[in-house]
Image (cartoon, rainbow, N blue to C red):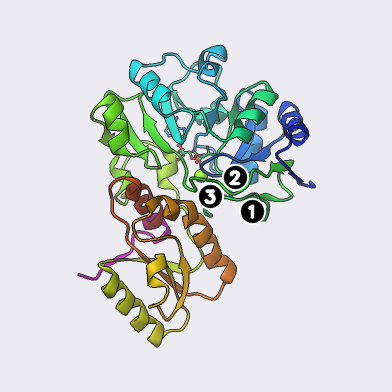
Amino acid sequence: MNTLLLSSSKEDIKTAAQFIKDGSIVGMPTETVYGLAADALNGGAVKKIFLAKRRPMDNPLIVHISEIEDIERFNLVSDFPVKAKALAQHFWPGPLTIIMNKSDIIPDEVSAGLSTVAIRLPSHRVARELIKASGTVLAAPSANRSGSPSPTTAQHVMNDLSGDISAVVDGGMCDVGLESTVITLATKTPRLLRPGLVTVEEIEKVIGKIDVDHAVLFKLESDQKVSSPGMKYKHYAPKAKVVLLNGESEKFISFVNNAFEKDNTVGVICYDEDVESVNAKTIPIGKTDDLQTQAHLLFDALRQVDELDCFTTVYAHCPVKTGVGMALYNRLIRAASFEVIDLE
Ligand code: TXA
Ligand code: MG
């Protein structure tokens, strides 16, 4: 299949919408990461997403809507809890996904046989125009090949999926850079399943205390039950080994310089301030205190590790576990297969 690289003009969005109406799959920009979209109400179309990504069929997809009213218009949920409405009003459009009990209209391919459905209203203009022009709601996981870092540019999508999908709409580099925060309201106490730019602290200001699923910060043991199927799959791993270093900046720098002296295939994902002092090749991801920029650049940095193809081991700072740091930590700890060295 020849994959079209479309612009975000009105005409090109119309072309992409026609692919969706015809039951084909299309890469679409969102403010978080690029998604691979299909008509969420067409099980056959949704199945193509799993084949193209080589995604396990038991991992459910997020349904993207273009306005809150779509939930009732398309009758997506069996009930819309008060706390879900409060979160929707506060954080949508934006990088928050809300899980609720589903209605019968949601195909099994979307919910992977669960009784719930994940819903998100993205803030990206192009995503919302594409959803509207398609006349339906769109199931979309991140548009990467399963296991590689989520794509934050149209080129990343082309690199992973060209030839396997009908088109990619280029909407520029994603602002947020990490996938949405996922919270379920289908449990008695709301529970965070994936951290993102919308933080636990911000959510609790709107709906009160929430639980954070154990698997957000800790490694799952093989016998543990998962709340979200995506948690059990390996994620975001470049080919080189990634190791996190926990400790202050001077110790980080002297550790990586020592390691580089012994082995010149060592690379470093670091803060802008470190670049001057590190002797190894660096991939900077923003200033020490600028967690938003770090989120924006992290996946591109992990992809660069593979593209440069000259590293055997890459060291990175271990992020703090609060605020946006929780999302950075959650992604990096998986890229590092939970390997952290304590420098203190
Ligand atoms: O920012 C995002 O959320 C991006 C953009 C494209 O919107 N999408 C995205 O989708 O990251 P995906 O499929 O890569 O991640 C969705 C996560 C998976 O870990 C999946 O297991 C979980 O959400 N999920 C989806 N539906 C669920 C459900 N009903 N119950 C529990 N977990 C669910
Ligand atoms: Mg994904």
Q: Which mark is residue 143?
A: 2
Q: Report whether the residue tagged 2 is closer than 8 Å to ligand 1.
A: yes
Question: Cβ–Cβ below 8 Å for labels 2 and 3?
Answer: yes
Question: Cβ–Cβ below 8 Å for labels 2 and 1?
Answer: yes
Question: Cβ–Cβ below 8 Å for labels 1 and 3?
Answer: no
Residue at (27, 30) in percent of width and height: 205
Q: Which mark is residue 278?
A: none
Residue occupied by mark 1: 160
Q: Report whether the residue tagged 3 is closer than 8 Å to ligand 2.
A: yes
Residue 110 % position (x, y):
55, 29
Q: Is residue 163 left or right of residue 288?
A: right
Q: Amino acid at mark 3?
A: Ser
Badge 2 marks a residue whose secondary structure is loop
The magenta region covers: 333-344
Q: Amino acid at mark 2?
A: Ala
91 and 308: which is toward the camera: 91
Q: Amino acid at mark 1?
A: Asp
Picture quadrant of residue 131: top right
Can residue 196 be seen in this snapshot?
Answer: yes
- Number of residues whose C-alpha sits closer than 10 Å to that of mark 2, classed few (under 14), some (14–19) or many (20 or more): many
Badge 1 marks a residue whose secondary structure is helix
Residue 92 % position (x, y):
46, 28
- Number of residues whose C-alpha sits closer than 10 Å to that of mark 3, classed few (under 14), some (14–19) or many (20 or more): many
Residue 161 % position (x, y):
67, 50
Q: Which mark is residue 150?
A: 3
Q: Is residue 340 magenta?
A: yes
- Number of residues whose C-alpha sits closer than 10 Å to that of mark 1, classed few (under 14), some (14–19) or many (20 or more): some
